Amino acid sequence: MEERQCKRAKFTEASSSSTSMIGKNNYVFLNFRGPDTCNGFIDHLYHRLRDVGLPFHPNFVFKDDENLCLGEPIAENLLSAIKHSKVSIPVISKNYAASEWCLRELIHIMECKESRGQIVLPVLYKVKSKDVKHMQGKFGEAFKSSMDRFDEEIKQQGPEALKTALTLRVYESGKFANGYVVYLVLTYPCRKKNFSINHP
């Protein structure tokens, strides 16, 4: 999975005694394109979420290069982490649609929203909503230049998952501070009836 550059950098430092994420409950799952966002926006957001959330939940936020372990099955762990999260934050950036795994994760996120009531808070990072919705501009070019490598399922369902995500409340990275996302994650679920911090 060549797009997971940030994750690979951390694999060499991971402990061989670390345990699998399969079946573990998380609170927030971060879905992002590493080369676009890993060394800035995502890192800042991850640390803010972790620092604020740890008193509430031992596995408050999942970020693949921080939580995946050396020798564990990557695909199975990622999809399990999504399934066992209550909130997903897809950070949609310029080259997001060039990554088969970003799209695969997003498809699974939207399925979990439909079947499990997962909360999804999409963030647009330096891209325009219309470009994402219509797969145009540089965002669309990134998808079209890479789609020959994608499974047919991703070619069909990826753009649909993006469109569905944009029907939700969307947050533009240039219009809010990362701390506001932290506030949303911590307070929005609490306003939902019968919503608890722990999984059943």
Image (cartoon, grey):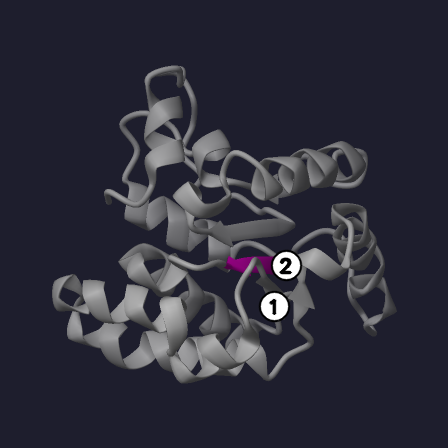
The residue lying furthest to the front in this view is 137
Three-letter amino acid code at the position of disc 2: Lys
> Mark 2: which secondary structure?
loop
Say if 43 sits above or below 129 in the image. above
Q: Is residue 106 left or right of residue 194?
A: left
Q: Residue at x 69, y 57 (%)?
A: 174
Where does label 2 land, which residue?
86
Where 44 sits versus 116, above or below?
Answer: above
Quarter of the rendering containing residue 196: bottom right
Specify the quadrant that holds the C terminus. Answer: bottom right
**Left or right of residue 126: residue 50:** right
Give the mark, 1 or 2, whose residue is nearer the N terminus: 2
User: How many dots with numbers?
Assistant: 2
The reply to whether the C-beta atoms of the residues labelled 1 and 2 are less than 8 Å apart is yes
- Which picture quadrant has residue 184? bottom right
Q: Locate residue 160, reporting x and y percent.
A: 39, 82
Residue 65 percent location from the top left of the image: 44, 33
Q: Residue at x 63, y 50 (%)?
A: 28
Q: Is residue 99 left or right of residue 180?
A: left
Find residue 125 and report its horizontal and vertical position in percent: 57, 58
What residue is disc 1 on? 118
**Amino acid at pointer 1:** Gln
Q: What are the residue bounds of the magenta stretch?
A: 87-92
- Looking at the rendered structure, which numbered label has been put on residue 141? none
